[in-house]
Image (cartoon, rainbow, N blue to C red):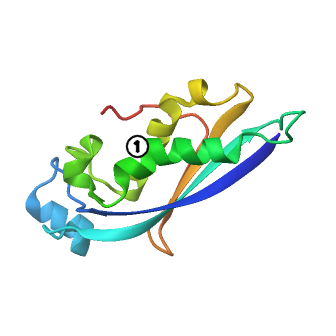
Amino acid sequence: MVRVGKRYRFSASHRLHSPALSAEENRELYGKCNNPYGHGHDYLLEVVVAGAPDAATGLVVPVGQLDEYVRREVISEFDHKYMNEEIEAFRDLPPTTENVARVVRERLARGWCAAFPASASLDSVRIHETRRNIVELCGDMEGGIKE
């Protein structure tokens, strides 16, 4: 098995705020990230595909096909958006990096089988929110997010 990764960038803003918590609890938990006006990040998204390379092409997946898929399913939907208001999944879900990774992985997974050969699987999604804050989701997801 071969694992192939690609990196993508998008810029988005968010406010860390949970409707399940009081205003005081949100301020205490999220600190400056609970700013009512939000704040932005230049995210780095890494998508890793696993599988056996095709005998004729030597590729696990065609890179251009992966790029187009990620652009359509994630980048076009997230880039330059205020996640809390412009991405349905985050209307009632705090857009933490953990939840952003879950939503991104779910978006990629939902049409994966139709877009790529059965031999190529979505192995992991890693989101770099900052140089120091990174979240990675590996393997199958349980308890997916509904949009």
In this view, the residue in front, 16 or 61, is: 61
Q: Is residue 93 left or right of residue 69?
A: left
- Identified at 50% across, 75% down, the residue is 131
Residue 69 x %, y %: 54, 41
Residue 98 visible: yes
Residue 97 x %, y %: 40, 58
Image position of 112 with respect to 50: above or below: above
Question: In the image as oriented, which residue stretches furthest toward the right?
Answer: 55
- Identified at 45% across, 37% down, the residue is 106
Q: Is residue 93 left or right of residue 48?
A: left
Image position of 103 with respect to 146: above or below: below
In this view, the residue in front, 27 or 54, is: 54
Q: Where does label 1 land, which residue?
A: 103
Q: Residues within 10 Å of mark 1 (few under 14, many from 20)?
A: many
Q: Is residue 53 left or right of residue 50?
A: right
Split into 4 quadrants, where in the image is the C terminus?
A: top left
Residue 11 x %, y %: 38, 65
Residue 19 x %, y %: 15, 49
